[in-house]
Amino acid sequence: MSVWLMSACVNTKRAYRQLSVYNYFAAKKNFYKLARYKRKKTVAYTGLAIIYGRSDNPFTNLDSAFHYIHQAKILYPGVPVKTKNKWKEKQGVDSLMIDSLYASIGRKHFEQYKNTGRREYWEKFLNEYKNHPYRDSALYYRDKLIVDSLTVVNTPDGWKFFLENYPDSYWKQWAEEQLLQEVV
């Protein structure tokens, strides 16, 4: 019976060891098992974010990676200091690693959205990554897509709408000039 209990018990060390040797199937399974335990959710979510954020496995999914790293960022401050020290020593998981992974996933999302050229993706990025270093660039690209579409239509109402809804835009002055040209 003790052998069965030992095999059923999932520990953090084993899951991260599996991750380190690229055994993504076993690591993912074990991180999900770890996530069932309240005191191990943060470290499990970080492991899942790593798996979903990497492009060298069949589980690559940036939306899932964001979900798990976002949850880890929320939960990490509530983890006891003793546990944080243990995670840092044994798995390398600490606030800097979580923040770095968050930034990395955000950068990948940014590049992905930049290649799509769709406004709704930029809106999603801006809603999800409120304090990301690429936020200003995302605002620029979102507003540029809107300005490009308004340039095609080129109506005073369109420019007024833009100026009312995006008053802090990089493109504000340009939009004002377009509005003046249309009015005159």
Image (cartoon, rainbow, N blue to C red):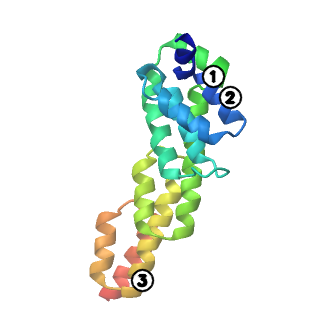
Near mark 1 (Cα within 10 A), the count class, few <14, some 14-19 or many ≥20, is few
Residue designated by label 3: 151
Residue 4 sits above or below residue 146 on the image: above
Residue behind mark 1: 13
Residue at image location 56% in from the left, 38% down from the top: 28
Question: What is the number of the mark on residue 17?
Answer: 2
Q: Residue at x 66, y 35 (%)?
A: 19
- Separation of marks 2 and 3 at Cα, in angstroms: 54 Å
**Residue 148 against residue 133 in the figure, above or below:** below
Front position in the image: 92 or 3: 3
Which residue in the rendered view is the most extreme toward the front? 1
Q: Is the residue under label 1 in contact with that under label 2 (CB below 8 Å)?
A: yes
Camera-near label (2 vs 3) is 2
Q: Is residue 10 left or right of residue 39?
A: right
Location of residue 164 by image quarter: bottom left
Please name the residue shown 33% across and 77% down the image: 159
**Residue 138: x %, y % from top left:** 50, 59
Question: Dot 1: what SS?
Answer: helix
At 35% across and 82% down in the image, what residue appears?
180
